[in-house]
């Protein structure tokens, strides 16, 4: 386990740095058929298999850490490749010991849980609980043992277009599987990957 430090403080692998913020703004336009699309004007963009545009960011971890923000690139990688959000290492154990705050849990009627908080490896759980101000406080802290989970969707913004110009909604959890949204996925700008726990037990509760 190797965790980068800044001024003596450990910096989680998924934390965004100031030098990674892209100066290129997202544009909104209409196709000939009237549908709306979000895009980068220079044509350089990252879209997933569903056509969702991912927020552009650097990956050099330069500048100063923005502890309240996560890197869209590294958060997505952690969710999809089972990487620890603190050290970035592959989690090889069959059960993931997931550390997060209860506010980051979104229970569903079928008993599963959605979250955008990436997993933590066993080696980094204690470090997180001692170094992270939010995790040091037991109130609201959750540790779950997750055996099975799946990529469910994204947390991001829906962009709309009207005669008055482009408009955006607030950040929302948006499922890849839903078909009843009044927009297509080319109107979505993704910031974080959302996953669904399907087999888990809660190890520690507030």
Image (cartoon, rainbow, N blue to C red):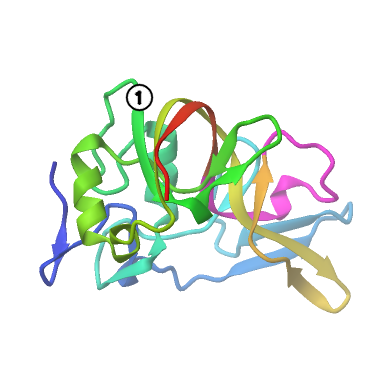
For the residue labelled by badge 1, is the local secondary structure a helix, a strand or a loop?
Answer: loop
In the image, what residue occupies the spot 56% across and 71% down? 25
Q: Position of residue 191 (x, y in %)?
A: 53, 56
Q: How many marks?
A: 1
The residue lying toward the viewer, choosing from 83 and 95, is 95
The answer to whether residue 48 shows anywhere in this view is: no
Above or below, 19 relative to 78: below
Q: Which image quadrant is residue 130 in?
A: bottom left
Where is residue 139 shown, x and y percent of the image? 40, 58
Please report the residue visible at 61 percent of the width from the left and 56 percent of the height from the top. 156
Answer left or right for 29 relative to 71.
Answer: right
> Which segment did they paint magenta?
176-193
Q: Residues within 10 Å of mark 1 (few under 14, many from 20)?
A: some
In what quadrant of the picture does the N terminus appear?
top left
Confirm whether residue 179 shows in the render: yes
Where is residue 23 drawn, in percent x and y?
Answer: 46, 73
Q: Report if residue 185 lies within the magenta region.
A: yes
Residue 45 picture location, percent across and down: 53, 53
Q: Is residue 13 left or right of residue 70?
A: left
Identify the residue at the far left of this view.
Answer: 8
Q: Nearer the viewer, residue 17 or 129?
A: 129
Please, which residue is most extreme toward the bottom here? 164
Q: Is residue 157 above or below residue 18?
A: above
Seen in the image, is 184 located left or right of residue 17? Answer: right
Reply yes or no: does residue 188 show up in magenta.
Answer: yes
Find disc 1 in the rendering and name its residue. 95
């Amino acid at each position: 386990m190797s965790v980068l430090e800044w001024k003596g403080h450990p910096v989680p692998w998924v934390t965004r740095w100031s030098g990674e913020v892209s100066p290129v703004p997202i544009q909104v336009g209409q196709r000939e058929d009237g549908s709306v699309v979000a895009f980068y004007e220079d044509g350089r963009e990252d879209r997933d298999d569903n056509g969702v545009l991912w927020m552009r960011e650097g990956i050099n971890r330069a500048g100063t850490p923005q502890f309240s923000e996560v890197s869209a690139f590294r958060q997505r990688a952690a969710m999809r490749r089972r990487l620890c959000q603190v050290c970035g290492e592959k989690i090889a154990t069959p059960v993931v010991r997931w550390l997060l705050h209860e506010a980051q849990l979104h229970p569903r009627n079928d008993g599963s849980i959605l979250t955008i908080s990436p997993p933590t490896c066993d080696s980094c759980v204690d470090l997180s609980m001692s170094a992270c101000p939010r995790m040091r406080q037991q109130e609201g802290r959750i540790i779950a043992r997750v055996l099975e989970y799946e990529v469910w969707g994204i947390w991001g913004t829906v962009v709309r277009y009207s005669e008055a110009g482009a408009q955006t909604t607030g950040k929302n959890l948006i499922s890849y599987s839903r078909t009843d949204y009044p927009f297509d996925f080319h109107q979505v700008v993704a910031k974080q990957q959302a996953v669904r726990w399907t087999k888990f037990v809660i190890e520690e509760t507030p």
